[in-house]
Image: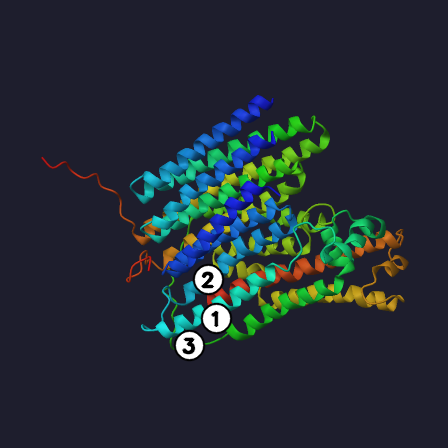
């Protein structure tokens, strides 16, 4: 069980590393919003899931740790609904304010 | 204390603060200031001060950012100042250096971190920590100190929140539009996605806030944090729907009624203790009228009643301040 | 185990520094809003990791729930501002 928890946390960290590189290097606001909205939410969910399994194992599966695990699932639910919606709101506002799309530069022969 | 996380967070906070001062656009400053508040909450958490972290998260990161954005919506976006102010800047720099060096000198006189003989750890704190469960049956010592041992201070804090709302309301509320109105023209925004997500989140936010108020005896929370989250849920209703729709649920008359009712509940419990023969806010005499409680449990129940009063005042204050700031006093349309 | 979780926390904070560079550089002010939203979501993880290191996760979970809700409110309110006031870069430049 601990190995599953550690694997989930490391996978979450890998996705978050991808998010931070993506936000730095992608050329346009709209492509950065893809990185920030989707990969960030997934990494948060995986890390919290890993922490929930770890806590369950650490407390030897007694009833209080199931209570804490239920609350962690509530956090996962809120982040799953709220974070992509917030990114949608930001992208909608940027589109209404007129941020330009990125064009690929044509090769000069 | 987790040293590594703490030190890195403090470095990031310093970078945030310098960046927030450096950016000319006021909206950029407000956004980076929101990050400052997020990271400050992490610092409090690494020092195991959970109640403070909860309050910082609720007030600074959530509601404070919304207030600042509403203010910028009704005023300018860029700071306007005169061109040559070198002399003023030099004077301010000197003042900062003098005051800063005095403060740095005072730090060397403070006791060591975690010193057992420090004044903060010896006089009354030891009594509170040892006797909180025996006197009041409440494990969370922060709540028992806040609502029982130091109940006067919390009552005046509630009054301060009340006075803040009344002051903002009295200054801003107007029934005619002034000649120089800086508000940009209002474009109505109708977004189905945000409405549905708010539909799903607002009832759970309110339920969670009631849980935080009621469970303040046993876990981090209490009246103030629960009240701020309740106010934030009403602000979310006002943002995702129209301003008028939110005003239908809780209009001005009800706001003013409830904000006074919260302070009345707090002070009223103290006055009831008078009539039963004890001192002001001496909760143990309430066991005479509460059925089937002894003096210890009477203190625990009275603490819950007092926290409900605080939560009511704070909820309506946050919501009312948002309404006044966002509509510039007109109460017709907001951000 | 404490060492592993401290390492996780420090790795998260170093990545937050990388996201912060976008908040510094971002040509428009909406790029800054995007990166601060990511930092807010990551602070939820940091609070839970701090809870596991202290071995008292039941205390820290309530703060994390409150945090997730308030991050959403701040992001939606700030994003709605740009529907009314469409200036993304002020006329005298962004950084002074």
Mark 3 and mark 1 residues within 8 Å of each other at the beta carbon: no
The quarter of the rendered structure image containing the C terminus of chain B is bottom left
Q: How is the image coloured?
A: rainbow
Q: Residue at x 52, y 29 (%)?
A: A9
**Dot 1: within a 10 Å radius of its alpha carbon, few (fewer than 14), some, or many (20 or more) residues?**
few
Circle 3 SS class: loop
- The vertical placement of B309 against B330, above or below, is above
Does the image show residue B211?
Answer: yes
Residue B178 percent location from the top left of the image: 42, 77
The quarter of the rendered structure image containing the N terminus of chain B is top right
Q: Chain of mark 2?
A: B
| Of marks 2 and 1, the one in the foreground | 1
Q: Which residue is mark 3?
A: B178
Residue C5 percent location from the top left of the image: 56, 33
**Dot 3: within a 10 Å radius of its alpha carbon, few (fewer than 14), some, or many (20 or more) residues?**
few
Q: Which residue is mark 2?
A: B70
Q: Are marks 2 and 3 on the same chain?
A: yes
Circle 1 SS class: helix
Q: Residue at x 47, y 69 (%)?
A: B328
How far apart marks 2 and 3 lie (CA) works out to 18 Å
Circle 2 SS class: helix
**Residue B95 bears which disc, if any?**
1
Mark 2 and mark 3 residues within 8 Å of each other at the beta carbon: no
Residue B320 percent location from the top left of the image: 56, 64
Q: Residue at x 69, y 67 (%)?
A: B156
């Amino acid at each position: 069980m601990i190995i599953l928890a550690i694997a989930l946390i490391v996978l979450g960290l890998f996705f978050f590393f991808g998010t931070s590189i993506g936000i730095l290097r992608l050329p346009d606001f709209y492509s950065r919003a893809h990185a920030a909205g989707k990969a960030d939410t997934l990494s948060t969910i995986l890390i919290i899931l890993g922490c929930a399994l770890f806590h369950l194992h650490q407390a030897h599966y007694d009833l209080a740790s199931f209570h804490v695990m239920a609350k962690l699932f509530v956090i996962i639910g809120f982040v799953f609904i709220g974070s992509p919606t917030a990114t949608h709101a930001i992208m909608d506002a940027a589109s209404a304010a007129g941020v330009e799309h990125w064009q690929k530069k044509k090769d000069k022969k | 204390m987790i040293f590594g996380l703490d030190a890195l967070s403090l470095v990031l906070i310093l970078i945030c603060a310098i960046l927030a001062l450096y950016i000319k656009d006021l909206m950029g400053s407000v956004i980076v200031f929101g990050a400052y508040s997020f990271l400050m909450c992490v610092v409090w958490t690494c020092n195991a001060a959970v109640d403070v972290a909860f309050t910082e998260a609720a007030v600074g990161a959530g509601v404070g950012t919304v207030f600042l954005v509403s203010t910028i919506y009704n005023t300018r976006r860029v700071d306007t100042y005169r061109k040559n102010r070198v002399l003023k800047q030099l004077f301010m720099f000197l003042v900062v250096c003098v005051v800063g060096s005095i403060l740095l000198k005072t730090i060397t006189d403070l006791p060591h971190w975690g010193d057992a003989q420090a004044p903060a750890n010896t006089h009354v704190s030891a009594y509170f920590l040892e006797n909180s469960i025996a006197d009041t049956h409440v494990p969370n010592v922060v709540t028992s100190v806040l609502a029982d041992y130091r109940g006067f201070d919390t009552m005046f804090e509630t009054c301060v929140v009340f006075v803040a709302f009344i002051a903002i309301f009295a200054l801003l509320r107007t029934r005619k539009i002034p000649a120089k109105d800086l508000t940009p023209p209002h474009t109505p925004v109708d977004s189905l996605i945000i409405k549905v997500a708010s539909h799903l989140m607002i009832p759970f936010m309110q339920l969670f806030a009631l849980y935080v108020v009621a469970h303040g005896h046993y876990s981090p929370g209490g009246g103030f944090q629960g009240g701020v989250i309740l106010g934030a849920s009403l602000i979310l209703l006002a943002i995702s729907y129209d301003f008028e729709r939110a005003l239908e649920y809780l209009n001005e008359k009800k706001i003013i009624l409830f904000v006074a009712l919260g302070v009345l509940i707090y002070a009223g419990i103290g006055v009831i203790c008078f009539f039963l023969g004890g001192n002001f806010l001496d909760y143990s005499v309430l066991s005479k009228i509460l059925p089937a409680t002894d003096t210890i449990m009477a203190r625990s129940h009275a603490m819950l009643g007092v926290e409900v009063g605080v939560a009511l005042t704070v909820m309506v204050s946050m919501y009312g301040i948002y309404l006044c700031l966002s509509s510039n006093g007109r109460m017709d349309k907001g951000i | 185990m404490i060492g592993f979780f401290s390492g996780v926390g420090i790795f998260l904070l170093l990545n937050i520094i990388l996201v912060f560079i976008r908040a510094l550089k971002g040509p428009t002010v909406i790029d800054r809003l995007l990166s601060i939203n990511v930092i807010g979501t990551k602070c939820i993880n940091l609070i839970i990791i701090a809870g596991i290191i202290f071995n008292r996760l039941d205390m820290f979970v309530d703060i994390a729930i409150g945090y997730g809700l308030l991050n959403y409110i701040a992001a939606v309110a700030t994003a709605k501002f740009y529907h009314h006031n469409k200036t993304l870069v002020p006329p005298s430049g962004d950084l002074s």
